[in-house]
Amino acid sequence: MIEVRNLYKSFEDKEVLKDVSTVFEDGITNLIIGQSGSGKTVLMKNLVGLLEPTSGQVLYDGRDFVQMSKQEKVRMRREMGMIFQSAALFDSLTVLENVMFPLDMFSQMTLRERTRRAMDCLDRVNLVGAEEKYPGEISGGMQKRVAIARAIALNPKYLFCDEPNSGLDPKTSLVIDELLHSITHEYRMTTIINTHDMNSVMGIGENILFIYEGQKEWQGVSGDIMNSPNKRLTDFIFASDLLKEMRQALTSSGASSSSSSR
């Protein structure tokens, strides 16, 4: 579990995060949503230590990451897996070598053990057979799956995903969503996903945090979103024409049911 308490972040005189307090639970997919510039990316960077909060706490199972020494933070990061927006694979390494990279850097395994672990991770994301290919030889969706395999190679307790569906077609995005969701439950990880993909929100949003102008505006599950009375949330959720039509259909259906019951 990751708990955020009274988190503030300012850049010079601009306050980007304002008194954010929330909890990200173990074993479920925790999503952070919000408009561009709302502060969700800054929040994630504060969670993983890429930025230092102006004030507040980030507690990993009760351990305050903000107050840790540099060496303690390095050790802490070994418990974290990261999936970047661009997949961030090494072009000069094969798929297998990319997945082995964190094992080579941080584990005490033998070469045979590292290779076996990397192949197990590739099997988990259905990429056995692609291990000798290079990133430039596989599709964008396959690259994201390689990134997931690399992120889970060290069996992390915490998994951070920054726009994992960016640049992918809807069908491939669903594959990535289902993979992240199943891996989260299988390994009981605390998974946090930064996204603006509403399919992800409705499909795997087990705990959703909506950030508005640097503040926690709403938190709940996907089943509560459609009927939320929070206008800022509904304006964000129903920004697309398709979702507006869905909302109108739901409203009409509700009105019809009410009328027929009378």
Image (tube, rainbow, N blue to C red):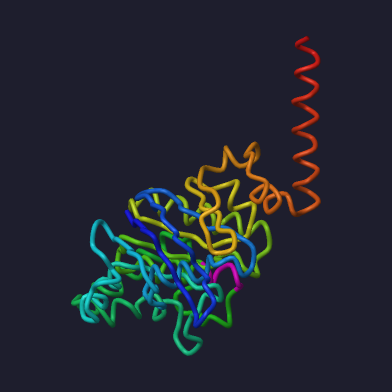
Left or right placement of residue 57 versus residue 163 in this view: left
* Furthest residue toward top: 262
Residue 18 vs residue 161, the one in the foreground: 18
The residue that appears at 75% across and 11% down in the rendered structure is 261
Tell me where residue 232 appears, x and y as whole percent: 66, 51
Dominant secondary-structure state across the stretch colored magenta: helix
Tell me where residue 95 appears, x and y as whole percent: 45, 77
Q: Which residues are magenta?
A: 139-144
Left or right placement of residue 163 versus residue 99 in this view: right
Q: Quadrant of residue 248?
A: top right
Q: Tell me if residue 91 comes above or below residue 208 in the rendering.
A: below
The residue that appears at 28% across and 67% down in the rendered structure is 79
Residue 212 vs residue 244, the one in the foreground: 212
Tell me where residue 227 appears, x and y as whole percent: 65, 36
Q: Tell me if residue 202 comes above or below residue 167 in the rendering.
A: above
Q: Tell me if residue 48 comes above or below residue 258 in the rendering.
A: below
The residue that appears at 42% across and 67% down in the rendered structure is 149
Q: Quadrant of residue 254?
A: top right
The residue that appears at 56% across and 76% down in the rendered structure is 86
Give the quarter of the figure containing the C terminus: top right
Q: Tell me if residue 229 comes above or below residue 252 in the rendering.
A: below
Query: Residue 141: within the magenta?
Result: yes
Tell me where residue 113 appears, x and y as whole percent: 24, 72
Residue 148 vs residue 120, the one in the foreground: 148
